Image: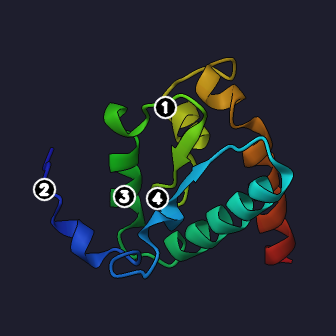
Amino acid sequence: MNNSRDWHAEGACVGHPDPDLWHYDNSNFDDEQKLQVLRTVEAIQICNTCPVKSECLSQGLERENLVWSFGGNGAVWGGLITSERGLMAGYKESHNMVQDEKRHARDVKKKLGTLIR
């Protein structure tokens, strides 16, 4: 397997004015939750236009990119949030990574669904 990260330069996220857009936390505050959902949706939409989305997702499935930090911080890689990538990597539905993100994942999917129609 080629571990080269040369593809990074081709990412749709390169040069974005807000590189933190691809990172979120699962706040307990309603207004912050809504903002994090909107930001995550925007990041996913950008990912969905990316020419190296599959390479990014592959890197996002690496163990060090699935580390779940205290408080429920996550990241978008290849258009998927942390819990989605965790499930792809073989973590169980009962894993804290998935459970802590249940509301965020649901709200992001709902928002994406309303944008697709």
The reply to whether callout 3 and callout 4 are in contact (CB within 8 Å) is yes
On residue 4, the disc is 2
Q: CA distance from mark 1 to mark 3?
A: 20 Å
Q: Amino acid at mark 2?
A: Ser
Residue denoted by label 4: 78
The reply to whether callout 4 and callout 2 are in contact (CB within 8 Å) is no
In the shown orientation, is residue 3 left or right of residue 34? Answer: left
State how many labels appear: 4
Quadrant housing the C terminus: bottom right
| Residue appearing at x 32%, y 48% in the figure | 59
Q: Amino acid at mark 4?
A: Gly
Q: Which of the pair 38/29 is nearer the observer? A: 29
Residue denoted by label 1: 69
Position in image of residue 68 (x %, y %): 49, 31
The reply to whether callout 4 and callout 1 are in contact (CB within 8 Å) is no
**Residue 94, placed above or below residue 86:** above
Q: Earlier in the sequence, mark 4 or mark 2?
A: 2
Q: Under tag 2, what secondary structure?
A: loop
Q: CA distance from mark 3 to mark 2?
A: 12 Å
Position in image of residue 2 (x %, y %): 13, 50
Res 114 quadrant in image: bottom right
Q: CA distance from mark 3 to mark 4?
A: 5 Å
Look at discs 1 and 3 and give the one toward the viewer.
1
Circle 2: is it few (<14), some (14-19), or many (20+) Cα within 10 Å? Answer: few
Circle 4: is it few (<14), some (14-19), or many (20+) Cα within 10 Å? Answer: many
Res 6 quadrant in image: bottom left
Look at discs 2 and 1 and give the one toward the viewer.
1
Circle 3: is it few (<14), some (14-19), or many (20+) Cα within 10 Å? Answer: many
The reply to whether callout 3 and callout 2 are in contact (CB within 8 Å) is no
Position in image of residue 96 (x %, y %): 63, 21
Residue denoted by label 3: 56
Circle 1: is it few (<14), some (14-19), or many (20+) Cα within 10 Å? Answer: few
